[in-house]
Image: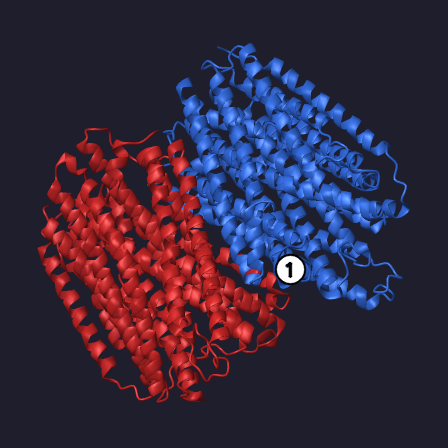
Chain colours: A blue, B red
Amino acid sequence: MEENPALFYGLSVLTAAIAFAFAAYLYFWVKREKVRNARIAEISLLIQRGAETFMRREYRLLAAFAAAVACVIFIILPEPIWHGGVMNNLAMALSYIAGTVLSAIAGRIGILVATLSNGRTAERAAEGIKPAFLTGFRGGAVMGLLVVGCSLLGVTAVLAITGDTTILLGFSFGASSLALFAKAGGGIFTKTADVAADLTGKVELGIPEDDPRNPAVIADNVGDNVGDVAGMGADLFDSNVAAAASALVLAQSLEGTGYSTISMVFCYSFLGLLASVAGIATAKVGKNGNPTKALNSSTYVTTAIFLVLTAVATAVFPGFSWRIWGASSVGLLVGVIIGLTTDYFTDDTKPIVRKVAHASASGPAFTVLSGVSYGFISALPAMVGIAVSALFAYSICAPMGDGYAIFGIAMAAVGMLSIVGMIISNDAYGPIVDNARGLAEMGGLGEEAIRIADELDSAGNTVKAVTKGFSIGAAGLTVISLLGAFMSEVNAALEAAGMPLITGFDIMDPTVFFGTLVGAAVPAVFSAMLILGVDRNAQRMVAEIHRQFDEIAGLREGTASPDYGRCIDIATSGALRELVPAGVMAIAMTLAVGFIGGPEAIGGFLLGNIVSGLLLALFMSNAGGLWDNSKKYVEAGAEGGKGSNAHKAAVIGDTVGDPFKDTAGPSINTQITVVSLVSSLFAAVFAAISVF
Amino acid sequence: MEENPALFYGLSVLTAAIAFAFAAYLYFWVKREKVRNARIAEISLLIQRGAETFMRREYRLLAAFAAAVACVIFIILPEPIWHGGVMNNLAMALSYIAGTVLSAIAGRIGILVATLSNGRTAERAAEGIKPAFLTGFRGGAVMGLLVVGCSLLGVTAVLAITGDTTILLGFSFGASSLALFAKAGGGIFTKTADVAADLTGKVELGIPEDDPRNPAVIADNVGDNVGDVAGMGADLFDSNVAAAASALVLAQSLEGTGYSTISMVFCYSFLGLLASVAGIATAKVGKNGNPTKALNSSTYVTTAIFLVLTAVATAVFPGFSWRIWGASSVGLLVGVIIGLTTDYFTDDTKPIVRKVAHASASGPAFTVLSGVSYGFISALPAMVGIAVSALFAYSICAPMGDGYAIFGIAMAAVGMLSIVGMIISNDAYGPIVDNARGLAEMGGLGEEAIRIADELDSAGNTVKAVTKGFSIGAAGLTVISLLGAFMSEVNAALEAAGMPLITGFDIMDPTVFFGTLVGAAVPAVFSAMLILGVDRNAQRMVAEIHRQFDEIAGLREGTASPDYGRCIDIATSGALRELVPAGVMAIAMTLAVGFIGGPEAIGGFLLGNIVSGLLLALFMSNAGGLWDNSKKYVEAGAEGGKGSNAHKAAVIGDTVGDPFKDTAGPSINTQITVVSLVSSLFAAVFAAISVF
């Protein structure tokens, strides 16, 4: 049966339009509210300008990088230009650029709304939890809707215009390039500022967090936005596009074998966006309600709506399969389960956080040792979950025919990512209310407003753990399907060259094994380079803060203002300087392994990279969240409370965890996707040239 | 060509006899020296008795465990007893018991000599570095010779008697079981005592290390022996047997295909032992010589002799191949290279240790973050080294015919482990001179003796980093060949059942992928359980030390003696209690994966286990060594020296690193081997029964 996906292209564009319209409505809803407190308006503007400075510089660097990569793509991909096919190469290069630009636009507007919402949320907090929650959440939801809308629109446009899924990999690579800059760069920025602000403020000077005398305090608030709003948005844009692209590569290779595979991918994607719109629209807390519950229940609403809508679509549309529906549902449910287990390890009402807090009473070495240990253990359920969902999705779809089993895994990833609009909204809510808390303090809005902002912030932290687990799980499944896409690309190239096809990657083949070992080391080295980058950059900023306190008369007494801009500059230029070597290392290792061992070695390389990447990402994210919440638990009075030895130890644990959970851990996702896409794009080149 | 390995069986037994005779000579050489200082004699005896207590209890628990496992083996392995083949099952069970017993004997005698040597080395230190070095080194060499002699004798005897390499896997599993108890149990013991002694002594009471008023001080010294002498010896006994056993399984499957493969394995093994005998005999320092140089140069001497002897053997014996010689030489050389890169990351004359020391000046969080980062980076060269050596060994041997390529990798592992007698001697030297340093202090032998003992101790630490890197590398290669052995076992079972054979493990097969993800999580969970075990056990011992200071009048003033025995008891019983769940978890996960996914899933499981196990073992061992030496570097005066904030931070780093490098890191090796052997032994069962 020949499928005609035109209907689904149209519905996808329509859904993206609905999402954009809803985002516009929410934007104006947020903007309509007034900021009355002059101090809040002023600081909020400083944060907004700081974020803009970072993003302008970041995008400038990225533009240079993307232009260079686009030239390379134009010359050699999908085939060297001297083999003909100029138009194809041009399409690939343009598609790459479109990927970076669309993601950048989503990030840019998302940041704008987030920095508009923070001050407004702070002021609403003085009126009660209900309006404050709504302002914070709706500000974040704009980002969620834009990211998913842009990615759906981009994927649809590229495929509708070119009809070639290989070109789509170029679009996906563009999204990944941006994510690498946004996530790793933003991650270095945010932790540089956070660590430097804490070290000088809390430790050396003994002034509270968010004290306006600290020159790093605005940079710290900017960091929350560029790291958690823009960075996380770009990361999930990337995962979302990669999941769709790899599913579509596999779908195209299945064309004419009996099912409407391409239509299914699009249908599931836009239904996921529709479900997210519905979930976002229903999110609210009662007058004395619980914001954590509100965030989680809207996630469950979205999940339920998605499952029902896709079931209806499966019943209605010809060429849709209940087996695929099963695979995608398994993916989504496992995503929720991974999120819940993450919660178990990082929630301070559960035993693990309390055990680490208790260990802190014996000194910081025990905070670190117990956090590292539970962090490692926390990786097990998620890894088993991903493994089992892949096994189920594969087994459910295998009876449909050759190639459908791996397509089932790709659809499990699409299912897990279907509610990503909701996930990003929850995520972006976090830094908005975190900023709001600081602004409520700096603007002198009173105890009750701060308490409400605190409650909103704490809900943000709890939900963040869940969404992080979710996004790592989704990345895991996505990359399995990217492995399938890679093999499909290699075989297309081998077939064109009249060479024998690859049927799989045997781990007893030493080139595969070689690739696996090297691939496994890459995420470790990548994350180490980012952490060391944060260290170096924080030291630069600490030196600048010391300089300001030495040179600006009256700063310590609060009669003069610090130079916030210099700290933002340092965080910005340092972050961009430190992220480049790590990114280059990951790409260079991929190319080196490919040219030494050929496609077989790359198959192993991707496997090793996924496996150790997942392990380390889960370990770092969860251990970081665990330390953060242990510190908060001690600060709330446990083990002697603030000022006790347990507290000092818990603060050290939190400082170790900061770059783990906000820089290295979440960047590993992006590293895995970048490496997978580079492999797929160079598949034909590796097949043609390699040493072994 | 039918090969007749009888000659090589004979030569192996002869070489083992030579090694035993030389060990006996060294034993009496050490014993002949007198201990004159009464205090040293007394404490040395306490250490010896403490070690004996631990080993007696450990062996009792092990005997119960081994008896239970032997019964299971008798009933179901190599085939369920109701399928007939009672004699085969009996041979397997007996072979298993022999593996545990031979390793236990080597460990038992080794500990005896080590605890004889420590006091004598301390007294010789008063006479100069030359005699002190010789006493310490020769004490350790007894262990090295016994371990390799016993393993060679055992392997030869089992194969000569049964002629069946599958039975040899039972022997190897016995050695692994013992190693699991000795290495993980000893590792928990030693760090329990170390951490508890430091926490109460240095931190709370402000008394120096090795102060006899501290009730944990003897347990701490006992720990060095049971962890580093007996534990490391059992670990390398295990690796050595596993390398030989997997090479022999593969060799047997190649019988009659043109080369004398079984003979080659035995020949390389006994030539390695002969080379070690020669290397040990030549180790000495000049009057003002450098002990580090002495240890390293005897390693190089052993390496060179082995390369020459095996070249001669290859030229002389018919059916020997230069390609195999090449593969084995590559393995050995890569082992040396891995050792040198480890040294780069952990030697305080090189930049990394100094960077971590410098970071400590900013606080303990930076000590931890920089140590973790460099620890991760340090894994890269070793993993690339193992990957490249496997690739080379495979490529060199592939032209010899089907199956020779993987045999080449096995011979690279045999090559890397050939000089293991020398490696263990260097390793066992470490705790002897470490003990000697404490005894010189406690016995009041004067500044000069302590200085010399310090110099010997520092050489021990440096060399330990190299030998650890070496043993992890060897384990990596060994397990690759165990993967080959596993496939060979599966196919033997499938062939016997008339089912289609397995040709490899394709990573695109979701059962393989499932196994890989689960297998990768196991070393993380295993090491986390051991670290948490150390924490819990150390807390029990701290409570006991507090009790003694509260209840024993005059202890603080030094007029009453502490009850050393209670601390040893706590460390012993706690260690054994904490190691069992970790070991059971690893074995249970293997069986669960095997019964769910069958042999394919186990292939993936082993790959994931090797890859993440190597990464974590290298990370933990190197980060631990790095923190240890950074602390020593600061104590020697850098960054403000003793008492500075940098020193406090470096001490915290060292405390984190202790269970990393001495408990979890080195136990991962054993975990990998245990899991691989369980897989091979249950290969036939998994092939017959599994869900997917």
Q: Position of residue B38 (x, y in %)?
A: 33, 87
Q: Position of residue A513 (x, y in %)?
A: 38, 44
Q: Quadrant of residue A148?
A: top right
Circle 1: residue type: Gly
Tell me the element at label 1.
helix
Does B88 sit above or below residue A534? above
Q: Return the residue nearer the eye: A399 or A55.
A: A399
- Left or right: A126, with A358 as reference point: right
Which x, y percent locates residue A638?
A: 63, 55
A681 with respect to B608 (left or right): right
Residue B211 in sight? yes
Indicate whether B589 appears above or below A97: below
Towards the viewer: A91 or B598: B598
Q: Measuring from the top left, give residue A342's x and y in whole percent.
A: 55, 41
Q: Label 1: which residue?
A: A640
| Quadrant in which residue B568 is drawn | bottom left
Residue A252 seen in the figure: no
- A497 lies left or right of A218: left
Q: Measuring 33% from the left and 79% from the top, which residue is drawn there?
A: B44
Indicate left or right for A626 with B288 as reference.
Answer: right
Q: What is the chain letter for disc 1?
A: A
**Looking at this view, is B417 or A419 the one in front?**
A419
The one nearer the camera, B205 or B556, is B556
